[in-house]
Amino acid sequence: MKSGLPSIWLHLVLMIALPFVAAVGLAAMFSWVAEQWEPILGIVGFLAGGITGMLVARAFVKHKLPARCPMCAGPTMYQDGNPIVYTCKTCGHAETTRIGSEGE
């Protein structure tokens, strides 16, 4: 039974890939916009865009995009830890991964 939610594996990949893509995109955009006012501001815009893109994208994937429960296909909540655990909101199943989130 599929629900349209990403699998836990895909959710973990998105936790890595989406912040990187958002950081590069926003860094380029902020840099271009800042350079329109003053060329030296391009560096500040690049750094601000990169940091903002990374933080916002990671928070979105972590808190607003649930993964699919392997038991009932319901939404799961991401929980930081070592290892990372996904707990289903519907059936309560806790899926433990082999990946940890040390450093957070």
Image: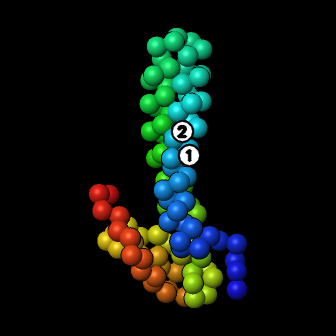
Left or right: 102, with 29 as reference point: left
Q: Which mark is residue 91?
A: none
Residue at 44 percent of width and 39 percent of height: 51
The x, y position of residue 46, in whole percent, is 49, 28
Q: Split into 4 quadrants, where in the image is the C terminus?
A: bottom left
Give 28 or 94, whichever is nearer the viewer: 28
CA gap, disc 1 and disc 2: 5 Å
Residue at 54 percent of width and 73 percent of height: 8
Disc 1 and disc 2 in contact, CB within 8 angstroms:
yes
Residue at 53 percent of width and 71 percent of height: 9
Question: In the picture shown, does residue 36 fall above or below 88?
Answer: above
Which residue is at the far left? 103
Quarter of the image where one finds residue 98: bottom left
The x, y position of residue 56, in whole percent, is 51, 47
Camera sees residue 90: no
Local SS, label 2: helix
Residue at 48 percent of width and 56 percent of height: 16
The x, y position of residue 86, in whole percent, is 47, 76
Which residue is at the far top? 38
Q: Amino acid at mark 1?
A: Val
The residue wearing badge 1 is 21
The residue wearing badge 2 is 24
